[in-house]
Amino acid sequence: MKHFLSLEEQSSSDLEYILNLADKLKAERGNTSFKPLACQTWAMIFSKSSTRTRVSFEVGVRELGGQVIFLAANDMQLGRGEPIKDTARVLGRMVHGAIIRTYGHQDVQDFASFSKIHTVNALTDHAHPCQIVADVMTIREKLGEIKGKTVTFIGDGACNVATSWIYGAMRFGFELRIAAPKQFFPAPYLIEQAGDCLKVTEDLDEAVRGSDVLYTDVWVSMGKEEESASRLELLKGYQIDVDLMAKANDGALLMHCLPAYRGKEVTEEVLEAHAQTIFDQAENRLHAQKAIMAWLVE
């Protein structure tokens, strides 16, 4: 039984296959003959609010021929304390796949184990693998093959998106730089695993020079609201503005997984100047996730 829970669990060849399929599905969108989820019902279990993730998965399941049930935590007994393994064993007898957006990564792993149905991690506090597949798809569209490129992540280098970028660098063969205050460096075990493909620094200028892509995310992730004041103070020197973009390579992309908070991690001017890339990136969530689900049921 195949699952898509984190990039660390996927082979480079499988990820390459998914990306090529995503390109094909995007080019052929509207062709109604490809229905790998026909006669299937997938459950979307969301404990965190969402715009792009919910819409892209709901549309994606339907375009692949399936039906979808959306379940917020309070819609289920999970909201009253039922163990995830019990919910998983019930849903595994009724639906064909599950898409889960929640806090604890172990919950997604447990669901996959106990449900025995295809399970997709739509975001946990540890990882956001679907986002990175869409991001790599976008970079390939605009800059060509990602292998050998340099991507610089700026801001909270310990967040789920940064963690997934680290595994992305290991799987796709590009250089990842993370510019962050020391308090927001990735976990030491991740730095050790990544080896030469990862460079972590507090020096923003050093990280940006020679970069093909600058990438940022919100400074206060869901579940971190109580830390807002301290996070904003520590990260205020890591804003992407016009001067910083100018230090990257000519034609460098700015990417953001959204939602964006203008005036914090990125200025309004820079975000709007790179809006085409950022909203192409958002659209590509649909195509990448359709490819992931199609690959799961092959």
Image: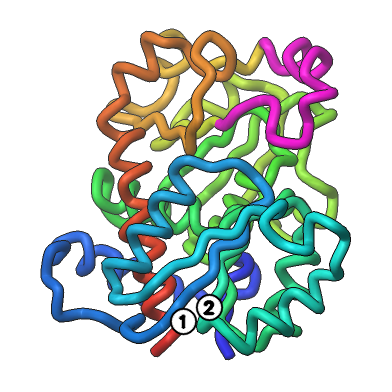
Residue 218 is labelled as none
Disc 1 crowd rating (10 Å Cα; few below 14, some 14-19, many 20+) is some
Horizontally, residue 250 falls left or right of residue 155, namely left
Residue 97 is labelled as 2
Which badge, 1 or 2, comes first in the chain's sequence? 2
Horizontally, residue 60 falls left or right of residue 227, namely left
Q: Is residue 147 visible?
A: no
Q: Tell me where residue 7 appears, x and y as whole percent.
A: 59, 65
| Distance between the alpha carbons at the discs numbered 1 and 2 | 9 Å
Q: Residue at x 37, y 42 (%)?
A: 282
Q: Nearer the viewer, residue 127 or 235?
A: 127
Q: Quadrant of the N terminus?
A: bottom right
Q: Which range of residues does the magenta coloring cover?
A: 217-236
Q: Tell me where residue 49 appears, x and y as whole percent.
A: 60, 41
Indicate how the structure is coloured in the image: rainbow
Q: Which residue is mark 1?
A: 296
Q: Tell me where residue 162 appears, x and y as whole percent.
A: 63, 44
Q: Amino acid at mark 1?
A: Leu
Horizontally, residue 237 falls left or right of residue 213, namely right
Q: Are marks 1 and 2 in contact (CB under 8 Å)?
A: yes
Q: Residue at x 77, y 36 (%)?
A: 223
Magenta span dominant secondary structure: helix
220 magenta-colored: yes
Q: Tell me where residue 88 appears, x and y as whole percent.
A: 72, 78
Examine the image and state in which quarter residue 127 appears: bottom right
Q: Nearer the viewer, residue 150 or 273?
A: 273
